[in-house]
Amino acid sequence: MKTKVALTGNEAVAQAMKQINPDVVAAYPITPQTEIVQIFSSFVANGEVDTEFVAVESEHSAMSAAIGAAAGGARAMTATSSQGLALMFEVVYIAASMRLPIVFPVVNRALSGPINIHCDHSDAMGLRDSGVIQLFSENAQEAYDNMIQAVRIAEHPDVRLPVMVNMDGFITSHAMDVLEVLDDETVKNFVGTYVPDDYLLDAQNPISMGNFDMYDFYFEHKRQQVEAMKAAKEVIKEVGKEFAKISGREYGLIESYKLDDADVAVVVLNSAAGTAKGVADELRAKGIKAGVLKPRVYRPFPQEEIREALKAVKAVAVMDRAETFSTCGGPMFADIRNTLYDLKNDIKVVNYVYGLGGRDLRLEHVQQVFEDLENIRKTGRVDETVKYLGLRE
Amino acid sequence: MTQYGPLNRNLGSGTRTKAVRSDMKWHELTRAGNIYEPGNANSYETGDWRSIRPVWNKERCIHCLFCWRYCPDASVIAKDGKFETFDYKHCKGCGICAKVCPVNAIDMVSEDEIEKVKEANKDEN
Amino acid sequence: MATLKELSKVEERFVGGHRLCAGCGHGITVRMILNAAEGSNVVVGCATGCLEVASTIYPYTAWKCSFIHNAFENAGATVSGVEAAYRALKKKGKVKEDFKFIAFGGDGGTYDIGLQSLSGAMERGHNIVYVCLDNEAYMNTGIQRSSATPIGADTTTSPAGKVIPGKQQPRKDLTAIMAAHNIPYVAQTAINNWQDVHKKAKKALEVEGPAFINVLSPCPRGWRYNTPDIVEITKLAVETRFWPLFEVENGKWKLNYKPKKYVPIEEFLKPQGRFRHLFKPGNEHLIKAIQEEVDSRWLALLERCGETPELPPR
Amino acid sequence: MAKVLEIRWHARGGQGAKTAALMLAESVAEMGKYVQGFPEYGPERMGAPIQAFNRISDEPIYIHSNVVNPDIVIVLDPTLIGKANIIDGVPEDGIYIINTTKAPSEVREMLGIKGGRIYTVDANQISLETIGRPIPNTPMMGAFIRATGVIPFDEFMARMREQLAKKFKSKPEVIEGNLKAIERAHQEVKGE
């Protein structure tokens, strides 16, 4: 049974967590994630879940306790944002290397400094190489759906990796939206029971975890992580198909929007993808063949799918809501450009850094991007590879 | 309840083997560097760290087991509540056992000396 | 009190083949603590440090029980996570057996970088025993000062130089800080008195809720004394009242050992290379200052324990 | 690439192999040669068999990999013979310099090798008599120079004196003791 409800992104994620009913949640509040922790605490207080909620004293301890819990054999979760994720940085790598299927929503917010509480993706991008799976969500519906699928992806025997479910701070987390939620039983059946194979609380089979790995073995264990990430691509698609059966909504690694015959396209994550789709529709009405590519999965990086989706496009704009300070553009720009290199078909790829610290992305900004792309397509000339959108210049 | 459908590409998961060898390939090693054999450090010998060794004097020993209690390397082996032997495979020769012995029933002897005695015996044979 | 005869029959759960230094205090302490946990299923968590790097070098583990290492500063949080998992899975019938949880950290991982995580774990009331293996400096990285390093000690980051004679600050009283958490059991002990360590470990493992034990666990390399002398040196720490043995049970402070006579602090300092510079002519005032600090702390402790605040007879 | 002389030290953690490798490097560098000196950073603790390495060349050294085929092997601890992998990767004409009371022929038998040149010196006894403690690392440098002749001994001693003076400013007896130890080892080392 599916029900249409109006929820904020935070409420939707908390709702998913309630239905998943994890064994342990360890979390610490931070704007704009705080509501998730608050709402979930009330579920615990009211006996609506039978989760052990550990109200830790920091995000570092949140992930550390989640690691301990997952290593103990529990289905464990945490949730964070921005500085909290930055404080977790060290232990996120450890969670991935220990192959613990911890699911954690990240409500994307700009990193200090200067301090700012609003959306950008600098927090998530800082951990793109940590070995966790990163899912991105355009709206509350996707955040909800991603949370439920994340459990299955993380716990798959071929994967066993943490999954970070991203959604935009305030834009998604605090805005009320209409979405369809599944009934408890359906979610319960879909996520199934977590059966750990290696865990500390197996009295018959004591195990040592988190061991000291020197130059003689460390490299090999890193290689195993790569393989798990490769397997994750297949698993994510498989889980997405199965999720379609219970929800009617199918998910893959990317979402291609009107790309089949597109001349120009933007690549963009999370909520801005919705805005970009709207603009593409307008342009289509005017006869411009515009399309949008929204990576749903950023790590592992869906290189083949993206190459396939963009191979016939003439000019592509990658929109990054984060800086790398490499002076060569944003993080996703590097990945997408790298992906298209092998096509050897002279696709022009440019970068727009936008929305840092919650700077609003307006329709006219995206219109400007498509306009630039049209010019590039017509002239074959790129004047500036990296541009800043909506910046006072 | 959902059954997981493994993709039969268990490569990324590593194995749960107990016997890890240095010639194993990356996908043969245990996942995440987990160790499935509790206490297998026992098969790693630290006895060659030792330059002096404790030697037990049976006549003097009163089996108080202070040596057992204070050995950092679990290398004093007690049996039925009595001193049984030293585990020379792991004893690092720290000399704590000899020092805590209230009746001087443990001598610390240089490995060089032991070597010489061994050789002398060999010559006789 | 069990005898060594009996205790020696308990299965060894920290086996030989670990790569701690010859004569390391941690090997002794860990064996004593696990010995006291006889018969129970145990999960050990360990902060990064000498014990951790030396006991689980892949593919070898010295632990005959489940073991987890996460990072340096988070042993408290990590083990509280395992304990939370235990409560959750026990409740659901997924784990049938009973378990005890022990976290080990050095003074670096406990007094300093891991204090927040430890404090959180204790305050939240997890049923875990946290054991600090206090060797009074960061030995794993090569003898740098910690907040457990005593005043005057020569370490690589508080070197005894021409103008500054070693560490300038007195040690932090972590045991008292832990007592201030009002948890069921807090104790300070030292390995020279194995009965004391054993008793306290037993109590800590038996209480419902968090327990903390601070064990003086000497490092022959960092303290620079002759390796075989570990028991003697630890005994001097206790006899000079540098490291008093006490416990705080449900808020009640109790002194566990009162030296019969006044042993001056020099007796503890002298055999150790890290204090050698204090004995150079002209540095008498430093030793005097250390003695004064030891005495005043001792008197304050006696008062807390409800004893007459007086120094032992000279 | 110019010939690079590679040295491997075998010792136990805490015996000063790292210090010796670094001091040798510093002294040789001051004599105008190009050098490297580095220990193996393992988890092993005091007492465990460890290794340290040197490279010496007349031209700049660019490689930064471990030494696997040493021309010269120096063993600081006599009890390591037959235990640590002393002969691993050493070429036929390799040189072994070993702190032991034994004669080179005895050591040859213990190592089970036919080729190579073996030198022995009782550096423990020498350091006991000169420095007052069994610290074999400095005397082994004297034995090394005698056995290999890669650097002029007198000049090395001058550099060493400077270095020791820096290290033990307040302990002239330690400086003299160490120099004496190097000198004696240089004289007393025995070849086959």
Image: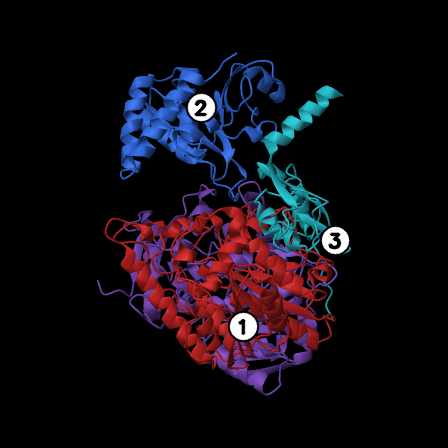
CB atoms of marks 1 and 2 within 8 Å:
no
Q: Residue A342, which numbered label?
A: none
- Tag 2: Cα neighbours inside 10 Å, few (<14), some, or many (≥20)? some
Chain D rendering hue:
blue
Q: Amino acid under label 3?
A: Lys
Find the distance from the CA under tag 1 to the CA under tag 2.
59 Å
Chain of the residue where label 1 is placed in the rendered structure: C
> Does A362 sit above or below residue D106?
below
Q: Amino acid under label 2?
A: Glu
Q: Which chain is purple?
A: A
Residue identifier under label 2: D6
Q: Which chain is red?
A: C
Residue identifier under label 3: B82
Chain of the residue where label 3 is placed in the rendered structure: B
Q: Amino acid under label 1?
A: Asn
In the picture, measured across the screen, residue B89 lies left or right of residue C307, that is: right
x, y percentage for residue D155? 29, 19
Q: Which chain is cyan?
A: B
* Mark 3 element type: strand
* Mark 1 element type: loop
Answer yes or no: are tags 1 and 3 on the same subunit. Answer: no
- Tag 3: Cα neighbours inside 10 Å, few (<14), some, or many (≥20)? some
> Does A308 sit above or below residue A192?
above
- Tag 1: Cα neighbours inside 10 Å, few (<14), some, or many (≥20)? some
Find the distance from the CA under tag 3 to the CA under tag 2.
52 Å
CB atoms of marks 3 and 2 within 8 Å:
no
Answer yes or no: are tags 3 and 2 on the same subunit. Answer: no
Outermost residue toward the front in this view? C314
x, y percentage for residue C257? 52, 70
Q: Nearer the viewer, residue C255 or C11?
A: C255
* Mark 2 element type: strand
Q: Nearer the viewer, residue D98 or D6?
A: D98
